[in-house]
Amino acid sequence: MNHRDTDVSGVTPTDGVREALAVTLRGCDELIPQDDWVKKLAKSERTGVPLRIKLGLDPTAPDIHIGHTVVLNKMRQLQDLGHQVIFLIGDFTSLIGDPSGRNSTRPPLTPEQIKANAETYYKQASLVL
């Protein structure tokens, strides 16, 4: 067998798994651990149960930033393949600020600020997901 028929996971990927892996790897420098991801994709395809992919953000600023959009776009691609995405908005870091004290640009926020930021995060993420 050549490397296209099996991969490091020991799973013989179907066309669907290959497509999902290609979508996942598109725009990625490296996927660690890829073999576990292939196994999860194969199990999802075999059982018909979509994967649940979660992203949790803490609304420490009024708007999501470009780094968030990279992950949101990848989640959208997986959603288009039939998987379930879960977008979580937390408040722990927003309530206490940067606990290490290294980032003075992340001060504690009021509950009202957190709520307002969370609403904009939801609206912005909803444009992608």
Image (cartoon, rainbow, N blue to C red):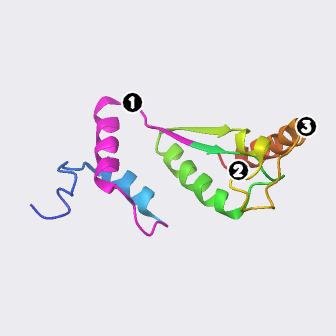
Per the image, the residue denoted by label 1 is 49
Q: Quadrant of the N terminus?
A: bottom left
Q: For the magenta stretch, what is the residue range?
A: 27-54
Per the image, the residue denoted by label 3 is 112
- Sequence-first disc among 3 and 2: 2
Q: How many tags in the picture?
A: 3
Question: Where 21 falls versus 121 (above or below)?
Answer: below
Amino acid under disc 2? Pro
> What residue is rendered at 57% in x and 49% in y?
76
Question: Which tag is nearer the camera, tag 1 or tag 3?
Answer: 3
Per the image, the residue denoted by label 2 is 99
> What residue is rendered at 28% in x and 53% in y?
35
Q: Report the side of 6 relative to 57 (left or right).
A: left
Question: Which tag is nearer the camera, tag 1 or tag 2?
Answer: 2
Residue situated furthest bottom in the rendering: 29
Query: Percent position (x, y) of residue 123?
Result: 79, 44
Residue 21: image quadrant is bottom left
